Amino acid sequence: MQSFDFKPSIRVVFGEGKIELLGDLAKDLNGSSALLVSDPEVRRAGIADKAIDSLKKAKLDVVIFDDVFPNPTVEHVQHGTVFAKQYKDLNLIVGLGGGSTLDCAKGINFLLTNGGVMQDYWGFGKATKPMLPSIGIPTTAGTGSEAQSYALIAQNGTHLKMACGDEKARFRTVILDPNLTETVPEKVGAATGIDAISHAVESYVTTKRNYVSQMLAKKAWYLLSKNFEFSLREGSTTKSRGEMLLGAHFAGMAIESSMLGAAHACANPLTSRYGITHGVAVGLMLPHVIAFNSHVVERLYRELLIASGSHILKQDEAGGNLVIQIKKLKTAANLPDKLRDCQIDRQDLPQLAKEASSQWTGKFNPRPISETELLKLYEQAY
């Protein structure tokens, strides 16, 4: 039997217009002065104004830090912490945006309450002091960061991603409002959506998988695979966007229990070295990792196919059919299929494999993987 230690601690409020409840939810956490962490795009879309209005209506003081960009670095977190320290009475943090913004909000919480630098928290459980209560509000259906206790923060210069985790860093409350994803550009929705799909697929088969993580991952895969293509179309329904948002959250919860695999290990060096958007990078590698893993988790891939409505009678065909389904989703989203389409130099593949071999997510891949196998995966993707 699979052992697990499941510690749910996040209140999740889901539905249209739930952003209007932010002020009341902040009051429930005894908030009186909030730091709102967001990004320029969310602010331009007017979403930040909705959050500010709700907080002020509940009589909270609000200051906003919106200098957050994709793949936040140590410098971004430090900048946000310096900004926050100007306001001595802050007792609540609200993260509003995509995964990068939510990670940055968690990073600021680490430094604001426990001091030091982000590198001090690389790993898990290294915060010795209490952290501020926080609320996470995703505006994309993607990373599932709002469901996790980890902040992924890149080092300056190398852009190596550090996973800095602590149960105290979890958002106490999460608002999933599909109305907030209405203005997401199709290109962004494609990248974040395939990232969420990869979370569901990878977390379902890792060596740390368990009953709870697989329950969450399977439901996430069902919701995401069913709605991904429709959610990208102009005039997509609120129901479709809502199910994508919920699917991404469930996949994030699954990661919290089971971690990820080789597709993410391969993707991170592509992002750090070439600046390829994380979701695009994962999408490039996922089909090849599925094929590589199918020898040991064919039965599990078959279960995912059945969950999405596919009828695969032969167990040894599941991996190949799942690859076909993933590629169809990528084609519908106009995502690149080969590394060479992304201006990657083939002579860099050995170095990419070396960097991928040091990524922590690869340690949980269901089939053991070394630098040699990683190089073969890059060559297949090229």
Image: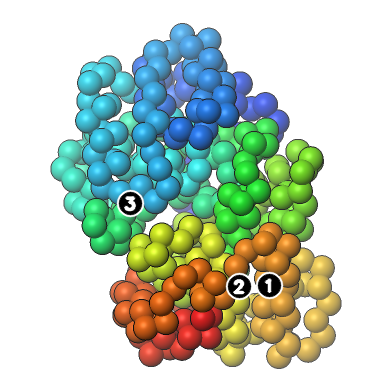
Label 3 Cα neighbours within 10 Å, binned few <14 / some 14-19 / many ≥20: many
Q: Nearer the viewer, residue 180 or 333?
A: 333
**Residue under numbered circle 2:** 337
The residues bearing labels 1 and 2 have C-alpha atoms spaced at a distance of 8 Å
**Residue under numbered circle 1:** 327
For marks 2 and 3, give the one nearer the viewer.
2
The residues bearing labels 1 and 3 have C-alpha atoms spaced at a distance of 29 Å
**Residue under numbered circle 3:** 153
Q: Is residue 204 visible?
A: no
Give the left or right position of residue 325, taking residue 104 as reference.
Answer: right
Q: Nearer the viewer, residue 40 or 371?
A: 40
Q: Nearer the viewer, residue 95 or 353?
A: 353
Where does the N terminus fall, quadrant-wise? bottom right
Task: Give, as a three-letter code, the residue at label 2.
Answer: Asp
Residue at the image position 27 percent from the left and 26 percent from the top = 84
Q: First in sequence: mark 2 or mark 3? A: 3
Q: Is residue 48 visible?
A: yes
Q: Where is residue 241 shown, x and y percent of the image?
A: 71, 44
Task: Give, as a three-letter code, the residue at label 1.
Answer: Lys
Say which quarter of the image contains residue 307: bottom right
Q: First in sequence: mark 1 or mark 2? A: 1
For marks 1 and 2, give the one nearer the viewer.
2
Please say if the residues under marks 1 and 2 sit with CB atoms less than 8 Å apart.
yes
Say which quarter of the image contains residue 296: bottom right
Residue 11 versus residue 307 in the image, above or below: above
Residue at the image position 39 percent from the left and 51 percent from the top = 71
Please identify the residue farthest to the left as the structure is shown: 116
Q: First in sequence: mark 1 or mark 3? A: 3
Residue 318 versus residue 138 in the image, above or below: below
